[in-house]
Image (cartoon, grey):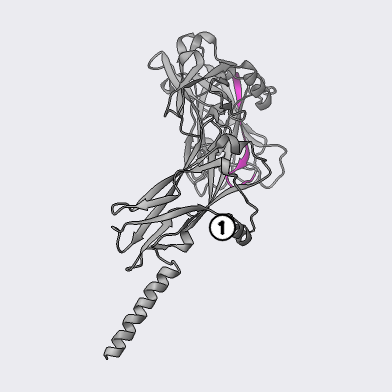
């Protein structure tokens, strides 16, 4: 019996030492202190060319049964480690030149109270940026020479630095929709964030300018007719100068709009991020323009429901076998209008409304089919016309459209050039088809 117990004890020791040897759990050992990199393997390091070093923190952990142990370990940059990594992973990294980095210490000491240590690697960003772009460089670091155990599976790091020129940019680009009503304060405040992709350590300014060419180009490209926000209707904070200070990586440009000089309508303030006083920064050419939309509309309480009748509705795509236009107005969600599915129709299917009087302001609402939302619109293009021949685009809707059964959509208040006929075109439904189904429909106008 004693021999069996001794053999079992020796076997358990063997298992314990094997677990340490093959590194399958740095916290499993009851007999040693184990050191390892918290992060290991290939690590991409994003750096920026700012005239200063870019820092990366190596983190070395100490684990095992005796967390109060005193130990030390060496950090080594090894050509052999990189060669082995390349061979095992099919990569072709070249060791980063010695003048491109500096490791704060190559021998790390752990006191009784230390469970981990940070070691800084300072990358020389200006030098790295000047290296041949076609060569992929890496810094292979490893843990060596300790009286205690080193987890072999977590003893190496392949740091792959990339250096970019930092940029500043608008966090909102393209056309950005905003609106305010004629109720409440005469002035409305809006914000447009200017930001950067790194922690800011500098004091500098960026200039935002109004560029009407942006609006002209947008109107032409999108078949819209937005008006330039008049100069006397807005004010930019700092007269368009956005000031950055250390630790502020995002600064809001404040836009104050005064409605007292405006008529109801869709206005745009076309803004371009023009320059930056920080010599190492550039303006992101893909995110330097924002068409800041301001729709000035009456309060919804001032709109009145249009008493629609079936003869006021028309469509280029009435389905002959089911779903008449009159069903949209019967107050019964179990009946519906179904645009054509059994016959071919050229162009997008639309519902057209002939209003009793000319207007410039409206909203609309509809309910999807009771059974399901498979033919609910995924995109709606809204156009207005005075004569039914020449149409002006008012809006394109894609966000927030319901796709379930018996769901109601109530649009925001919209404004456009004077119209008496309004067209709702649906180029695509929720499942990708070219027809659509509504069970109920209504409009309000100013």
Q: Is residue 160 above or below residue 280?
A: below
Q: Is residue 61 above or below residue 396?
A: below
Q: Residue at x 67, y 22 (%)?
A: 217
Residue that label 1 marks: 81
Where residue 333 appears, as percent x and y from the top left, is 48, 42
Q: Residue at x 67, y 37 (%)?
A: 348
Decide whether residue 428 is among the magenta residues.
yes
Q: Residue at x 41, y 52 (%)?
A: 60
Q: Main secondary structure of the magenta part?
A: strand
The span picked out in magenta is: 418-433
**Quadrant for the N terminus in the image:** bottom left
Where residue 150 appears, as percent x and y from the top left, is 43, 61
Give neighbour class at mark 1: few <14, some 14-19, many 20+ (Cα, 10 Å): some
Q: Is residue 291 above or below residue 429?
A: above
Res. 23 visible in picture? yes
Q: How many marks?
A: 1
Decide whether residue 141 is among the magenta residues.
no
Q: Residue at x 46, y 30 (%)?
A: 200
Res. 359 visible in picture? no
Classify mark 1: helix, strand or loop.
helix
Where residue 248 appears, as percent x and y from the top left, is 43, 28
Question: Which residue is outermost to the left?
Answer: 2
Where residue 141 appears, as percent x and y from the top left, is 51, 52
Question: Which residue is outermost to the bottom?
Answer: 1
397 and 51: which is toward the camera:
51
378 and 303: which is toward the camera:
378
Q: Is residue 101 above or below residue 310?
A: below
- Left or right of residue 345, residue 264 in this image: left
């Amino acid at each position: 019996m004693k021999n069996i117990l001794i053999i079992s004890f020796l076997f358990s020791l063997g298992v314990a030492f094997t677990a340490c040897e093959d590194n399958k759990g740095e916290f499993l050992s009851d007999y040693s202190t184990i050191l390892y990199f918290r992060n290991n393997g290939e690590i991409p390091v994003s750096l920026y060319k700012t005239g200063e070093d870019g820092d990366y923190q190596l983190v070395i952990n100490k684990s095992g049964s005796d967390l109060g142990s005193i130990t030390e370990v060496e950090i080594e940059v090894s050509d052999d480690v990189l060669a082995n990594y390349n061979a095992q992973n099919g990569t072709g990294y070249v060791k980063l030149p010695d003048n491109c980095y500096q490791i704060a210490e190559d021998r790390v000491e752990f006191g009784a109270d230390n469970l981990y240590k940070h070691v800084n690697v300072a990358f020389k960003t200006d030098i790295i940026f000047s290296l041949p772009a076609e060569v992929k460089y890496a810094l292979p670091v490893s843990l060596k020479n300790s009286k205690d155990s080193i987890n072999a599976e977590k003893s190496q790091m392949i740091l792959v630095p990339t250096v970019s020129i930092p940029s500043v940019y608008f966090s909102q680009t393209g056309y950005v929709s905003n609106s305010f009503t004629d109720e409440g304060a005469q002035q409305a405040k809006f914000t447009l964030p200017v930001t950067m992709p790194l922690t800011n350590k500098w004091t500098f300014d960026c200039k935002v300018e109004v560029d009407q060419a942006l609006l002209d180009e947008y109107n032409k490209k999108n078949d819209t007719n937005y008006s330039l926000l008049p100069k006397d209707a807005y004010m930019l904070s700092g007269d368009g100068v956005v000031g950055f200070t250390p630790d502020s990586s995002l600064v809001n440009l404040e836009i104050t709009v005064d409605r007292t000089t405006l008529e109801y309508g869709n206005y745009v303030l076309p803004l371009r991020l023009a320059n930056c006083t920080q010599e190492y920064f550039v303006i992101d050419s893909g995110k330097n323009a924002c068409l800041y939309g301001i729709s000035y509309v009456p309060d919804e309480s001032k709109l009145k429901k249009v008493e629609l009748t079936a003869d006021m509705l028309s469509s280029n795509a009435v389905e002959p076998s089911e779903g008449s236009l009159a069903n949209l107005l019967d107050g019964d969600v179990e009946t519906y209008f179904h645009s054509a599915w059994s016959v071919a129709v050229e162009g997008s299917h639309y519902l057209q409304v002939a209003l009793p009087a000319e207007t410039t302001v409206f909203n609309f609402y509809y309910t999807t089919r009771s059974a399901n939302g498979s033919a609910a619109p995924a995109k709606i293009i809204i156009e207005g016309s005075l004569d039914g021949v020449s149409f002006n685009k008012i809006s394109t809707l894609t966000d927030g459209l319901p796709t379930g059964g018996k769901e109601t959509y109530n649009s925001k208040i919209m404004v456009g050039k004077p119209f008496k006929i309004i067209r709702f075109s649906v180029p695509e439904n929720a499942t990708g088809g070219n027809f659509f189904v509504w069970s109920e429909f209504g409009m309000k106008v100013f």
